[in-house]
Amino acid sequence: MEQQTKNYSASYLYNKGNFEKSIVKFIMSADIVDKNDKSFEDIRYDVKRRQVTSSLMKVLNSDNIILLKAKTNEQALSRSFKVFAASDIRSGDRRTKVFIDCTAVITDKDGAYNIADKNMDIFISYLLNAMVTLIYWVQPQKLLNNTAIIENGSQAFSDLTSHVVDYMRIGSVDKIRERTKYLAALYFQCGIMCKEMTDSIYQRARKISGFSNREADVVNYLMGDEEKIFKDVNTFVESLGRVLKIEDKLNLDNFIERWAWLFGSGTEYGTEIFTAFSSLLTNAYVGAYINNQKTIEKVCGRTLVDYTNAIFKIGSELA
């Protein structure tokens, strides 16, 4: 069976705003960074010198990666969309490519491209995210069927979600943290990685939460129809409130607000889209302070490193 992917248009949060128009406008109006320009060789050299994995040079040189710069900083995209996949409507070939908003990262002075040393780690972070995004749309099974990605991703998402609930200090039922991690692990695999519900998915969630079969059965009964609750982040948060018996205190707005406050503005789509969640982790690993990396490191611990190393391994197999 072909592995299912999930784009932003299928995201509940994306459809609450009017982002499509701004993204299309950005693609059509922003300046294209000419990677064949002589002055770009200095950037290429710095990436090769600073890159966290050798695969990033392949990504940088790929024709499927388009670097764009808004004409003014005010026209740049929000933090959520610094790296995104879209149909190449500008060139007319309509193929899906990965676009990177390099506004304020790559400068163009007197016809020469440059990246300030302080911005190089940001650019490295974007390239790593672009690599994952490209693989996700070209060969998704390499990511979504990889055991290390599934296990470490599920663990990290469960830990992050539990941290949000802990921080909100709501709920009084027994084993709040375990219930949160169990449900979050199920949602990550089905709602974010788009997997069909199987015994192995339940088993992984039980392992992450530390639940016995009986304890898991109780939560399964309380959470409701699995097809509905894993549809999107809104139905997940509703189910979480039901399982924790805090429907009156937990809703999508305060969950996402707390998520963004704890982990950084622009990380909200990590609750729905795999590539956005992956960038939350890999950005923290690279250390460019794009997000609240200290909090993410503290919450995820070794899982952050193991996840990113699994990404590096997959990237090393790029043709």
Image: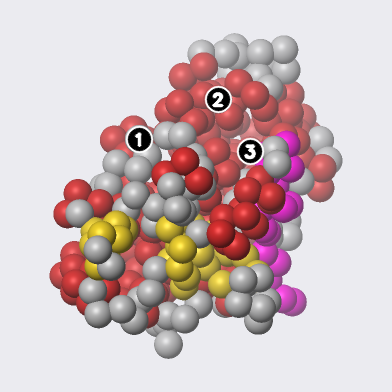
Residue sitting at x 60%, y 21%: 254
Upstream in the sequence, badge 1 or badge 3? 3
Camera-nearest residue between 121 and 148? 121
Residue 274 on the magenta segment:
no
**Mark 3 lies on residue:** 183
Residue 242 found in image quarter: top right
The residue at the far bottom in this view is: 319
- Which residues make up the magenta segment? 1-16
Q: Amino acid at mark 3?
A: Leu
270 up-or-down from 32: above or below: above
Sequence-first disc among 1 and 2: 2
Image x and y of residue 127, in percent: 37, 64
In the drawing, what numbered circle is on residue 257?
Answer: 2
* Element assignment for label 3: helix
Query: Looking at the picture, how far across and down is residue 266, in whole percent?
Result: 49, 40
Q: Residues within 10 Å of mark 3 (few under 14, many from 20)?
A: many
Left or right of 115? Residue 211 is right
